[in-house]
Amino acid sequence: MRPTQLGEAVAERRLQLVIAGKTPREVVVRMGRPVPMDPGGTLADDCWCPLQVVVEGRAGPVRVIAGVDAVQALELAHRAADIDLDLIARAEGGAIEWTGGGRYARGASSAGQA
C-alpha cells in the first residue's frame, strides 16, 4: 500500500537556506523506511520511499518515491530531495548550504562538506 505519511525516518539531513541579507533558515530532509509495494505479490521487491522536506519547521507534503527495491527507492528519494532543495533555493532567491557553512551540491555526502 502506498504510504501517505513519512513513518519512521531512516535518514535525515540538516541544511540551511541562505538568502542575502537574511538570517539562514533551517532545512531538514527526511526519508522514511522503504515500504514494499505488493508484499507477497508479483512486485514483492518493489518499494515506496516516503520523503519530506521541512523548512523552518514547516513540513512540506510527503512525497513517495518508487524503486525496484528498498536500496533504489532510497537512492531515488535522495535524488528527488536534491531537486526539491534546488527548487526551494530558486523560489526563495537563495542557496542551500551545509549547516555551519559550505555550499551544498547535488548528490553531496557529509564526507564532501566544505
Image (tube, rainbow, N blue to C red):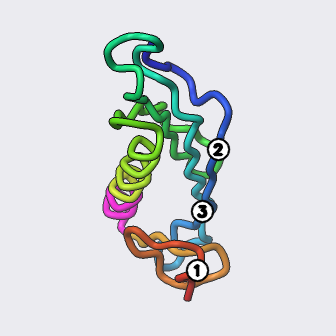
| Residue at figure coordinates x 36%, y 48% from the top left | 76
Residue at image x 40%, y 75%?
105
The picture places residue 90, in percent across and down from the top left corner, at 31, 63
Badge 3 amino acid: Arg
Could you tell which of marks 3 and 1 lies nearer the N-terminus?
3
Give the mark nearest the N terminus, 2 or 3: 2
Q: Is residue 45 magenta?
A: no
User: Picture coordinates of residue 51 (x, y %)?
Assistant: 49, 39
- List the residue tagged with mark 2: 10
Is residue 86 magenta-colored? Answer: yes
Q: Secondary structure at mark 1?
A: helix
Return the residue at label 1.
111
* Quadrant of image for the N terminus: top left
Q: Would you place residue 89 above or below residue 95 in this image?
A: above
Left or right? Give the position of 101 relative to 45.
Answer: right
Residue span colored magenta: 85-93
Q: Is residue 80 left or right of residue 31?
A: left
Magenta segment, prevailing SS (helix, strand or loop)? helix
Q: Residues within 10 Å of mark 3 (few under 14, many from 20)?
A: some
